[in-house]
Image (cartoon, coloured by chain):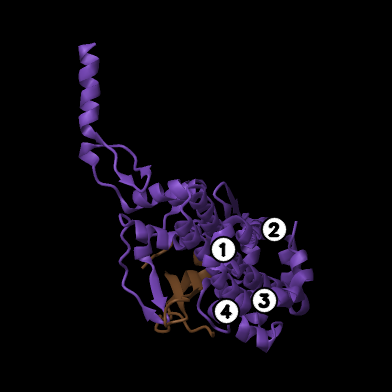
Chain colours: A purple, B brown
């Protein structure tokens, strides 16, 4: 008995648990008493969006590895995972970039439990597809100017994955925006359950800043399919045969629509606190949602052909 | 609001993956809104081949 008590005492002495917010970090032996940046992020994610912990574990993308520009000015990387404010502010971006990292391994993340990988044949076919900037021909000049993300992702010659990799690159972005937005809304929900309205609104604002990517990327993807149908029948027929790609589009769309529904329900959910976010929601709706939502209707038929 | 070119000085042998582009509204500050771009660069020898080779993304 004495021996057992001694062993238990030793365990007590040599094991520690650190706390970040309300969530304890994993217990470690004294000899391993340093926590990595990833472990701090995991711990935070476990508290507010536990479903996404597995994604962080498998494909974590550190904010300190990004290039970040604000109004065109590159910022110094100063992310500190032991700083709770940093974790809160970077949460949606971390999920977005981590999704990209996960997607770089030949597949597409739908949700943390669903990752669809292209078959070899699908990969071979899609490598011959045209760049996304071809959609210039089927997107009005007005839309090219008004769509917030048009210039960044699909304007002629822009050197980004969404352009260079055609519809595959567009779906990679679609998956990243969807998962980032979904995770932020899960965190919003959990913060509300913890009665932390201020934090909940911070997460909701992160989702708001990206939710209209749903309309924009549906326009880009729909325009890509439309261009193929009108000007490149060979690619069009191949796209229609890419079962995995169609599943990726269909499932990400369902998840994105669920997220949009949660945002629409914010006035009911937040009740008297809705005024804290109303200005932001109205601003995004007026400046980004209204036009893109209407313009997306021009591509409904082609988007429908991608659904399974 | 119009977009701007992210990382205009990017060398031609790399391209941006993992791009995130967001507008932020600041009601109570003088600056009404600003735009944030986050990007990760990857060698652009052949984007499609690179993308499909199970390669580990190069993060700078």
Label 2 sits on residue: A250
Q: Can residue A131 be seen in this view?
A: no
Depth check, mark 4 against mark 2: the one in front is: 4
Say which mark, if any, is on residue A148: 4
Q: Earlier in the sequence, mark 4 or mark 1?
A: 4
Tell whether label 1 touches label 3 (CB within 8 Å): no
Separation of disc 4 and disc 2 at Cα?
Answer: 23 Å
SS at badge 4: loop
Side of A264 relative to A280 (left or right): right
Tell whether label 4 touches label 3 (CB within 8 Å): no
Judge whether B10 appears above or below A259 on screen.
below
Label 3 sits on residue: A290
Q: Which of marks 4 and 2 is nearer the N terminus?
A: 4
Depth check, mark 3 against mark 4: the one in front is: 3
Residue A85 image position (x, y, % from top left): 36, 60
Indicate the chain on which mark 4 is placed. Answer: A
Separation of disc 3 and disc 2 at Cα?
Answer: 23 Å
SS at badge 2: helix
Classify the position of the C terminus of chain A by image quarter: bottom right
Depth check, mark 4 against mark 1: the one in front is: 1
Depth check, mark 3 against mark 2: the one in front is: 3
Label 1 sits on residue: A274
Q: Which residue is rendered at x = 70% and y = 75% of the image?
A: A223
Q: Which of marks 3 and 4 is nearer the N terminus?
A: 4
Separation of disc 2 and disc 1 at Cα?
Answer: 32 Å
**Crowding at mark 4 (Cα within 10 Å: few <14, some 14-19, many 20+):** many
Tell me, yes or no, whether dots 4 and 1 are on the same chain.
yes
SS at badge 3: helix
Side of A233 relative to A277 (left or right): right
Tell whether label 2 touches label 3 (CB within 8 Å): no
């Amino acid at each position: 008995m004495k021996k057992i008590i001694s062993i238990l005492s030793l365990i007590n002495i040599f094991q520690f648990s650190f706390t970040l917010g309300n969530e304890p970090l994993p217990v470690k032996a004294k000899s391993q008493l340093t926590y990595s940046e990833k472990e701090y992020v995991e711990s935070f994610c476990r508290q507010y969006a536990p479903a996404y912990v597995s994604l962080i574990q498998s494909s974590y993308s550190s904010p300190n590895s990004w290039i970040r520009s604000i109004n065109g000015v590159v910022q110094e990387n100063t992310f500190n995972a032991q700083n709770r404010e940093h974790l809160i502010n970077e949460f949606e971006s971390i999920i977005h970039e981590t999704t990209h990292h996960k997607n770089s391994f030949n597949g597409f993340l739908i949700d943390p439990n669903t990752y669809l990988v292209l078959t070899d044949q699908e990969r071979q076919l899609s490598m011959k597809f045209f760049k996304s900037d071809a959609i210039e021909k089927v997107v009005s000049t007005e839309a090219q100017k008004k769509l917030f993300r048009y210039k960044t992702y699909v304007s002629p010659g822009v050197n980004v994955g969404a352009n260079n990799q055609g519809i595959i690159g567009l779906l990679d972005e679609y998956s990243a925006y969807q998962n980032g937005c979904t995770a932020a809304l899960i965190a919003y929900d959990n913060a509300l359950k913890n009665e932390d309205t201020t934090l909940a609104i911070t997460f909701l604002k992160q989702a708001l800043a990206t939710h209209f990517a749903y309309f924009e990327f549906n326009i880009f993807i729909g325009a890509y399919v439309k261009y193929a149908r009108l000007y490149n029948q060979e690619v069009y027929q191949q796209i229609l045969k890419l079962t995995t790609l169609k599943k990726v589009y269909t499932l990400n769309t369902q998840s994105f629509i669920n997220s949009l529904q949660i945002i629409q329900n914010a006035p009911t959910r937040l009740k008297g606190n809705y005024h804290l976010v109303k200005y932001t929601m109205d601003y995004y709706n007026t400046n980004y949602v209204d036009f893109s939502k209407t313009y997306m209707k021009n591509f409904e038929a082609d988007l429908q052909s991608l659904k399974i | 609001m119009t977009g701007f070119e992210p990382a205009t000085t990017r060398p031609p042998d790399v391209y941006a993956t993992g791009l995130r582009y967001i507008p932020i509204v600041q009601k109570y500050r003088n600056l009404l809104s600003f735009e944030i771009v986050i990007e990760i660069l990857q060698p652009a020898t052949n984007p499609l081949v690179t993308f499909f080779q199970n390669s580990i993304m190069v993060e700078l």
